[in-house]
Image: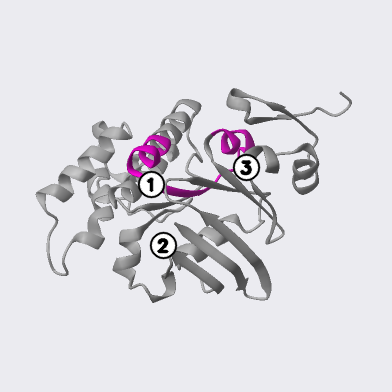
Amino acid sequence: MIEARSVSVRLGERDVLTGVDLGVGRGEWLAVIGPNGAGKSTLLKAVMGLVAHRGDVTLDGRPAARLRPRERARLMAYAPQTPALPADMTVFDYALLGRTPYIPYLGRESRSDREIAASVLDRLDLTAFAGRRVGELSGGERQRVVLARALAQQAPVLLLDEPTTALDLGHQQQVLELVDRLRRADGLTVVSTLHDLTVAGLYADSLLLIADGRAAAAGEPAEVLTEPLVGRHFDARVRIEPGPGGRPVVHLVRGGT
C-alpha cells in the first residue's frame, strides 16, 4: 500500500502542489488525471522522492523519507514521461539498468538479471530491438524501452508518468494490458498519470483529479468522470456515457451541437 498525506511542492516562486492526499492499496491502479500543468507529474516525482516536498509518503506504513535510495528503488519503479536516454546504449543494456538496485556495488549483473531483462523485452515486443541503439528508435519505441527498464526492477509499486505518450493505438493497448496483467497476477500497485480520460476510466480502479495543484476529486471512475467536473476543470464540452462494464466513456461535443 502506498499513501501520501498533505503533499505540497514549491518550485521557485510557484506552489505546484498544495496539500494533496492519495492512497492506493496493494494490487490496485490509481490514475492521476487533470489538465496540462495541473501538477500530475510533480506528484509522481514527489512520491518517488525526486523533488523536495512537504507532507508524508509511506509504503506499507514505512516512511519513504527514511528509506535508502537502493531500498526505495526495490520498492518503487518510476518511468518518467521524457527521460534522458543514452543514445549509444543498446536497448538490452538500458533495460538491464532496471536491475541496478539488486547488483552489488562494484559487482556485475547475474545470469538471472539478464534473463529478467530479456523476458521484459519479450513482453513488450522489443526482443527484435535488443541490439539496437536507443538513439535509433522512434518515440514510441523509446517509450516502451523506458517502461521495460521500470518493469525490470520488479518493484511492487510502479509509478508511470504518461506511459502511452507517443504510442500508436495498438501499442497503447499492449502496454496498458501488460501493466494490468502484471498488477493482477503479481499484486503490483500502479500509480500513473494519463491524459486520455476514457482510458483512465477503463483501466484504473480509482482516479485522482488534480487541478491548479490541488485535489479536485477522488474516487471510482464514475464518481470522478462526470460532465460537471470534467467540463469545469478541463474547460471542455463533453458528454459522458457508460461504456464497457459500466465504466464512463468521455465524448467531446462539437460547438453548436
User: Is 196 drawn above or below residue 103 in the view shown?
Assistant: above
Q: Which image quadrant for residue 226?
A: top right
Name the image quarter holding the N terminus: bottom left
Within 10 Å of the Cα at label 2, are there few (<14), some (14-19), or many (20+) other Cα atoms? few
Q: Which residue is mark 2?
A: 60
Q: Which residue is mark 1?
A: 188
Nearest to the observer: residue 66 or residue 97: 66
Number of the label disc, if any, that sits on residue 220:
3
Q: Amino acid at mark 2?
A: Asp
Within 10 Å of the Cα at label 3, are there few (<14), some (14-19), or many (20+) other Cα atoms? some
Nearest to the observer: residue 144 or residue 57: 57
Number of the label disc, if any, that sits on residue 80:
none
Nearest to the observer: residue 213 or residue 133: 213
In the rendered structure, which segment of residues is drawn in magenta? 179-202
Q: Amino acid at mark 3?
A: Glu
Residues under numbered marks 1 and 2 in contact, where contact means CB atoms less than 8 Å apart = no
Q: At 35% across and 52% down in the image, what residue appears?
A: 156
For marks 1 and 2, the one nearer the N-term is: 2
Query: Would residue 89 be visible to someone looking at this image?
Result: no
